Amino acid sequence: MKTLTIVLCETRESELTFDLFKKNLLEVLQSDLALCVAINKRENVENPFYKNAKYVWTYEEPEDWGEAFDYAQQINGYSGNWRKLLKIKDQWLGGVKGKDEHPGSASIVLFFRWFLKESLLNSKVLNKYDRFIVTRSDFMHRIPHIPLDYLKKDKIWIPYGEDYGGYTDRHFVAHRDLVIKVLSVTDDIMYNPDKLYSKMSYFSRWNPERFTKFQFKQMNIKSIIRRYPYTMYAVRSKGGHTRWAKGQYDEEHGYYIKYPSEYKRFQIASKYVNKKEDWNKFKLYLIITIVFLTEINLKNTFRIILIQILIKLKIKNLILKLRNISIKNRS
């Protein structure tokens, strides 16, 4: 199984993250690396992400990311006033300038999903790989990514959490047959703006996560979304660039943890996994269950009892399997 890991948007924080990114993601999964990023004054093309990348696709960063959406619309022969979507609030198109503009920079990820799709198709790289991981460079991978053998290829896999009413857009795993569908989440903005406007105008608190989930439902792929544990967390160095979350400084590690809730999910996974061989299907679902029970604020005693029941059920199932094997061997 050939895997391609793709860093989207930019290669920030390479000094902090690359060594563990290479060890616990690229090497664990025996994955090639690609970059699909903006060229700007901050982007250092001498950093290790570039030096280890097999493919690099770049787009010159504009002052107004609306120009990038104009380009995406025109290059495929479409027209229509997609900017009317800015009237639909709240911050899912941040980075597009003009009347009714949104805060933040969410449009950048949306544009680069479209740009990555075009790059994969035009370069014919798509057919060279079985699985694709689309991620970000500022993730700290202190434990191994889950082996892809445990993630069914007919599903789309997203880390559990950081959803904000939708699905996190920071990382996903998809098979060759599904990755283009996932990356098409942006298409309606440029290709069907009137239809999209009519479907989204009922709500006024859209964010990129809600938009992603909404589009997955429209594309009939929401039913094949599956979740797996967060094994990484986003970081920022002192003085490091950020477009949104500044994070909380951690004295022990010497960097900012951008999303404390994401870090807590990583911490839970790190209690059960330290090396690749620690992973199995039971750990996959056990960790997600523990995270879920933690986040719904059950009392500690009840939570511990539930976890113990899960572990005992696993042991019981193993005993039954061994017993069945023994009976078969005797017969």
Image (tube, rainbow, N blue to C red):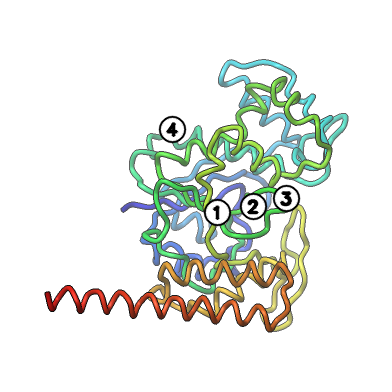
Q: Quadrant of residue 67?
A: top right
Pair 2/3: label in front: 3
Q: Report the Cα–Cα distance between label 2 and label 1.
A: 7 Å
Contact, mark 1 vs mark 4 (Cβ under 8 Å): no
Q: Report the Cα–Cα distance between label 3 and label 1.
A: 14 Å
Name which residue type carries label 1: Ile
Q: From the viewer's perspective, is 91 left or right of 56?
A: right
Question: Helix or strand or loop: what does disc 3 sit on?
Answer: loop
Q: What is the quadrant of the C terminus in the image?
A: bottom left
Depicted 138 relative to depicted 330: above or below: above
Q: Earlier in the sequence, mark 4 or mark 3?
A: 4
Name which residue type carries label 3: Gly
Q: Residue furthest right?
A: 99
Image coordinates of residue 321 in percent, x first then y, are: 30, 74
Q: Which residue is mark 2?
A: 168
Image coordinates of residue 244 in percent, x first then y, are: 77, 54
Q: Earlier in the sequence, mark 1 or mark 4?
A: 4
Q: Which residue is mark 1?
A: 158
Residue at image point 72% right, 35% down: 65
Q: Which residue is mark 3?
A: 165
Q: From the viewer's perspective, is 330 left or right of 274?
A: left
Question: Helix or strand or loop: what does disc 2 sit on?
Answer: loop
